[in-house]
Amino acid sequence: MADFQARCGIPVNFPGFQNAMIPQDVVMFFDDFLSCSWATIANGTDEAMTWKSTVVAQAATGLTILSGTDAAEDEAGGVLSIETEATANDGENLQVHGESFHLDGGYPLYFESRLLVKDVSNLDMFIGISQTDAEIFTGGVSNRVGFELSAGTLSFVSEDATVQKTTACDITEADDDWIRVAFFWDGLRLIASVDTDDNGTFTHQATHVAATTADYVPQAIFMTPTIEAIVGSTGTAEILYVDYVLCMQQRFSE
C-alpha cells in the first residue's frame, strides 16, 4: 500500500487519473465551506442549495461556518461546525443533492475530508458517500462507503444491501484533534487511509475487495457525499468540525 500512501491527497496521480484533463475527464465535487451551502429545502426548488440538511430527532439545527482567528490558524480557510443538541441519538445529516458517484470497474474514485471531533467518546459520526437517506445510523441505510466513528472507535465501513464490512482503523482518535481521512476505489478495491497527524502523510488502514462477497462493496447504486453527526449515549451537546469534502471520479470509461 506504499504506492497509495505516497499519492494520497494528489488524486490526479492515481491510476485512471494520470494525464487527466479537468473537467473533461474527471467529475469533481469540492466544498471548502467558505460560506453557507446547505438548506432544509429539497432539490428542485429555487431555495435548494448544495447540501440537503436534515435534523435527526432534535428540534433545531446547529450548522455554522467558523470565523477564522489568528489564534487558530488550523481553523482558517472555511470550516463547517455541526453542533448537536444535548439529547442522546439526536443530530444532523447532510447530503449533496443528487446521487452522482458510483463504484464500478473503469471508474476510479477518490474521497478525502479533514475533520475534528470535540468529544470522540460521545459522538457517532459518518463521512463518505452513501445512497440518499436522512438517517444513516438509525435509518438503516443500505449502501454506503466511508469512515464511521462510534463509541470512540474510528472504522472504515462498506455496506451493500444492509450488510456491512467494518474494519477498525489502527489509530487512537483523540478529542479536539484534526485528522484527514481518505479512500480510493481503483475499480476492484476500496483502499482506506488516515492522516492522524494532519501533516499530509497518510497510512493504510483497510482494503475491501469487490470480488470478496464478505467485503460488501456497493456496486449497484449511485451515491452522494454524506456527513452525519449523532450524540452518543450521554446527553451532552457535541460538535463536529469539517474543513472540506472532496469527491472526484473518472468521468468516462473507454
Image: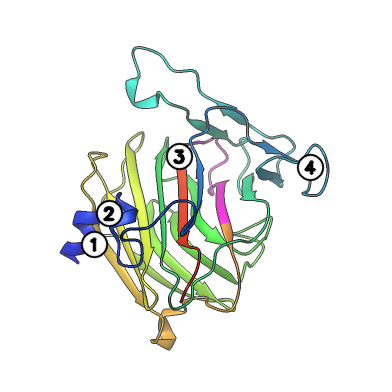
Residue 167 left/right relative to 6: right
Q: Name which residue lies at 64% across and 67% down.
A: 140
93 over 60 or under it: above or below:
below
Asked if the magenta segment contains residue 234, the reply would be yes
Q: Earlier in the sequence, mark 1 or mark 3?
A: 1
What type is the residue that disc 3 sits on? Tyr
Which residue is identified by label 1?
4
User: Mark 1 or mark 4, which is nearer the start of the sequence?
Assistant: 1
Report the Cα–Cα distance between label 1 and label 3.
21 Å
Measuring from the top left, give residue 119's x and y in whole percent.
42, 38
Residues at badges 3 and 4 in contact (C-beta under 8 Å)?
no
Note whether 62 is above or below 222 in the view shown: above
The residue identified by callout 2 is 8
Q: Type of residue at label 2?
A: Cys
Residue 142 location (% of width, % of height):
61, 72
- Label 3, on which residue? 244
Asked if disc 2 and disc 1 are in contact, CB closer than 8 Å, the reply is: yes
